[in-house]
Image: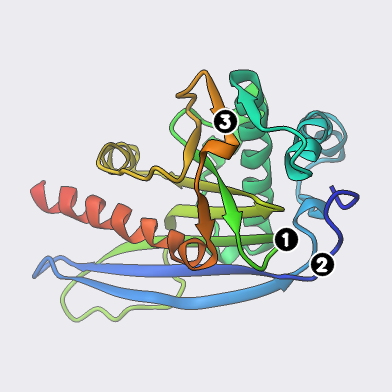
Amino acid sequence: MTKVLPVEFDKHSHETNLKYQRLDTGQVDIVKPNYIRVKQGHVGSWKLMIVCIDCNITWMSKIEAEAIPLLTPLIEKEREILSQQDQTQLSTWVALRTVIGEFVDIATQAIPESDRKILMETKLPPPDWNIWVARYKGPLRQAYRHRGIALREMKHGEKASSLAVKHISQCTILILGELIFFVLTTTERGALNQLMRNSDNTKFARLWPLLKEKIVLPDLPFISHAEMLDMPNYLNYLVETITSDNKKH
């Protein structure tokens, strides 16, 4: 990947949003974002060092190797149409990069082990992940952004503690040339399905779960840099859906 995109030391950020729902009043307090950590390095060169060597040299390497011949002409704008096979292959690679990216900063990790196991065993993203692709027009050639979000129920008089919570949802943004990938996952599956049913974003094409026979990239309008920066706010909408469901029960 570094042959296609030069090693530019862009900032790769990990953030977390915390939301506290008070059990006595139902009020939701939002801290956004109270934690930001910036790292450097090329997104295509990160390795997941905590896994076994066999994993790195077998299934992970196979996913990477199969994706490069597809990604390279896409990044260089020599290929414009994605078949369903292409969409599946891209989604799997993006899912792997998403998992690896979370281990760069475990404090904001939100993907459960069960999801990682599905990726390893099936070589496909978990069926309830949502992955999109769009075209990006902005100053970045390659970038990675990750935000995790935690929801904690608080009793009366209890004080909020910074990161002493378990993250339940995350979004990941990958920029490669004019391609931008957006990944949204959560352990609250029903809330994500409800959010997606009510979402109407014509600038993105859904890669996963498969939706279209083919995606024609030039048909998609560009995502501006400002719109890219606003994309993690989907997490806020997601948690609003979760807390709304909690209140009903």
Examine the rendered structure and indicate whether residue 180 appears above or below residue 218.
below
Residue 49 is at least partly visible in this image:
no
The first of marks 2 and 3 along the sequence is: 2
Q: What residue sits right under mark 2 in the picture?
A: 8
Residue depicted at x 33% and y 61%: 236
Dot 2 falls on a residue whose secondary structure is: loop
The kind of residue tagged 3 is Val
Q: What residue sits right under mark 1 in the picture?
A: 141
The kind of residue tagged 1 is Arg
* Residue neighbourhood size for the residue with mark 2, other residues' Cα within 10 Å, grouped as few (<14), some (14–19), many (≥20): some
- Residue 32: horizontal and vertical position, in percent? 38, 75
- The residue closer to the viewer here, 205 or 159, is 205
- Asked if labels 2 and 1 touch by Cβ distance under 8 angstroms, the answer is yes
The kind of residue tagged 2 is Glu
Marks 1 and 3, Cα distance to the nearest angstrom? 21 Å
Dot 1 falls on a residue whose secondary structure is: loop
Q: Is 10 on the left or on the right of 183, as rendered?
A: right
Marks 2 and 3, Cα distance to the nearest angstrom? 29 Å
Q: Is 15 on the left or on the right of 94, as rendered?
A: left
Q: What residue sits right under mark 3 in the picture?
A: 216
Residue depicted at x 43% and y 65%: 230
- Residue 1: horizontal and vertical position, in percent? 84, 47
Residue 239 is at least partly visible in this image:
yes
Residue depicted at x 63% and y 47%: 99
Q: How many marks?
A: 3
Marks 1, 2: nearer the viewer: 1
Residue 95: which disc? none
* Residue neighbourhood size for the residue with mark 3, other residues' Cα within 10 Å, grouped as few (<14), some (14–19), many (≥20): few
Marks 2, 3: nearer the viewer: 3
